[in-house]
Image (cartoon, rainbow, N blue to C red):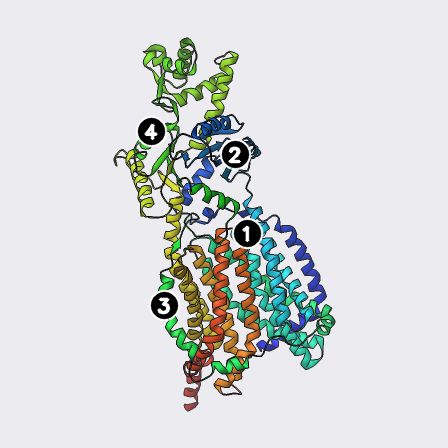
Amino acid sequence: MSNSIMRKIAKFIVEKHIIIMLLFVVLVIYSALSISKVRVNDDITALLPPKTATRRGLTVMENEFTAFASANVMVSNITCEKAAELAENLREIENVATVSFDDSSEHYASSSALFTVAFSAESEDERAIDALEQIKDSLSDYEVSVSTTVGQDYVKQLAGEITQVLILALIVIAAVLLFTSKSYFEVIILFIVFAVAAVLNMGTNYWLREISSITNSIAIILQLALAIDYAIIFCHRFQDEYDRQRNVKSALTDSLAYSIIEISSSSLTTISGLVALMLMQFRLGYDLGLVLTKGIICSMLTVFLLMPGLIMLFHKALLKTRHKNLVPNITGWGRLLSKKVPVFLIIFAFLLPAAIVFSAKCEYTFSDSETDRITLSEQDRIKAHIYNTFDETNMIAVLVPVGDYTKEKALISEVNGFPGIRSALGLASIEIEEGRVLTDPYTARAASELLGVDIETAKLLYALYGYEHDSFQPILGDSDAFAVPLIDMLEFLFEAKDRGMITLDDDKEQMVESMRGTLDDALVQLRGEHYSRIVFNAAVPVEGEESVALIENIESSARKLYSENGKTELSEDAIIVIGDITSAKDLEDSFRMDNNRVSFLTIAFVFIVLLFTFRSLGAAVLLILVIQSSIWLNFSFPYITGTNLFFVTYLIVSAIQMGATIDYAIVLYNRFQLRKQDYAPKQAMAIAVNESFSTILTSGTIMTAAGFIIALRTTDLYISSIGLTLGRGALISVILVLTVLPQVLLVGNKLIEKTMIDFKKLLGGGADEQEKLDETK
């Protein structure tokens, strides 16, 4: 019944191929126009679970504060005195807010000076970009290294790298397809099909709210590696059917009907792994899993609907350019694997325990700075050069309730005494004069001396302030004792001037406007509607017990201070501490849950698909065992080579490797079961290895090559790590499937047969028994 339905569907597609092709033209145009509208987010912290402190804190900062750009500028081979002169020159550059430099080891070491520059504009702002260019011009006579995000278009840079990766991958894939194809023109049809599927997938990303830059970059390569098999299966099936029938339409109809079932079944294991990935707390898994699942669906629909029309159009070229099979016959290798002594299985049995132990010892990292990089960008090299001379510091932002300057000052004073804290920046730390900060209370006389205005004007200003704020002490009481935080008085001064309540001469006017600009820059960065922000610089690593303890101590001190030693109850969001350290800690916590969840669900989903596909408990267990072993072997390499691995690489690659490379094992198992109908198990296996070799070689080589090219040609930490590990995993899976799996299946052949399950009988058994009972009556 199902075959009859599939043939009707296939016949309809073949007969209506012109209409379907026109529909695809419309879809491709729509998708191509939509690609530029896709929102791409290059902030990986946006993918953190929303309940984490880091995500909550970042949301607050995005809503309440402005983050101005900064740069670390290192000048080598210079004296400290000359560096001090350069610092003064840099401060004169327009839109440079501050330049931090002194003779401490934080700023001068090994005849090198490190200037910490803060701009009065954001990273993408032309003012910051122009200021950075002026800094470079002013230091052009020196050996300079500049580490900054100013003017750095990360998404554009990554897009350029991925374009190179795609070109190289297509060259390799073309070579592989030419080698394993049956017709030269077949390669052109395959590339057309893939191009259409890729455009459809990229264009429909517009339907999603936004996608991560990581997904945006590697989805097209992974879609190619995961789904190009579908087009190959259909194309080869058509050519086989045409050789048998010698009729294009009939061959297309039969081959399509068969391929819809085969390809849909094959895709289920891959989709299973991707669905498990989508259940990660860290939303990169959901993001990548969703886009790749959509990509596989786009690929299948393109193969089922568009490819028959392409073959109808180009069948003459397809058939005229057929060539002899270039894939070597490896039946002899299959016979070797079928000998009495399963050498590879014995080796595998020794390697497996070590792989399990070594993979469990793989060191995972949760931050950029702690992860071993495969390739370095120019900015990575500059950072490494700077941090080889100066200690790397990490910023810790503390968000506290707005308005209590006394507590802010007390908190800054307390935290400055913690080990590792180098500096602090907050409204209550901006020094106005020796021993006095911006938030300290000033009397009218002290303010007049600081601001350079006469005492009468200052007293008038204070009286106006008291009147506006319902405080009559400066009017009716002791005006000399009335003190107001300087920051509040300055804001009132600007307001009073704007309202015409006071007038100033030209010199004072210019000074006040200069102060207004400086204060406004500070306020947008450090004071929001509900929170004040205090930023500490700490010379501690991003990961480790020392860093976590520092974060906990800072939060504890803040909560103790603002709750007045527990007298006032504070909500979870009253005090928020965030930074790279908290981000790494949150990612580590999510990994503990995601690791077990993704691993278990991937295996469970794939197991269920295999069980219902092959109807053998033993077959499902053996196939999964071999592929899971390839995953263990894959993640043993970091431990063996003494390198670490970014945690998300493990979660993504283990799910994709299980879901995708299990297909290699399925191809071999299917051929083995088919040939067992006519041959003894050992001879059947020898034939099965040879017949499945071309498919496994094509799929495995494409995924391996794509992974390694991604790793070697992209400088993004996450993408290169995923590429290397996926490429290595695909290669290991191919090796195990062509060496160990045949011997596992031969040894486990009786187990496979004894654990066969007849689902129809199992589900319908009750009805059969009832029928027998009725007959006896």
Quarter of the image containing the N terminus? bottom right
- Pick out the residue farthest to the top: 456
Q: CA distance from mark 1 to mark 3?
A: 43 Å
Q: Which residue is mark 2?
A: 142
Element on which disc 1 rests: loop
Examine the rendered structure and indicate whether residue 297 appears above or below residue 110: below
Q: Could you tell me which residue is drawn at 44 percent across and 34 percent down?
A: 113
Element on which disc 2 rests: loop
Q: Which residue is mark 1?
A: 208
Q: Nearer the viewer, residue 769 or 51?
A: 51
Specify few, some or many for label 3: CA neighbours under 10 Å numbering under 14, 14-19, or 20 or more.
some
Q: Which residue is mark 4?
A: 409
Q: Which residue is mark 3?
A: 354
**Which mark sits nearer the N-terminus, 2 or 1?**
2
Q: CA distance from mark 2 to mark 1?
A: 48 Å
Specify few, some or many for label 4: CA neighbours under 10 Å numbering under 14, 14-19, or 20 or more.
some
The type of residue carrying mark 3 is Ala
Quarter of the image containing the C terminus? bottom left
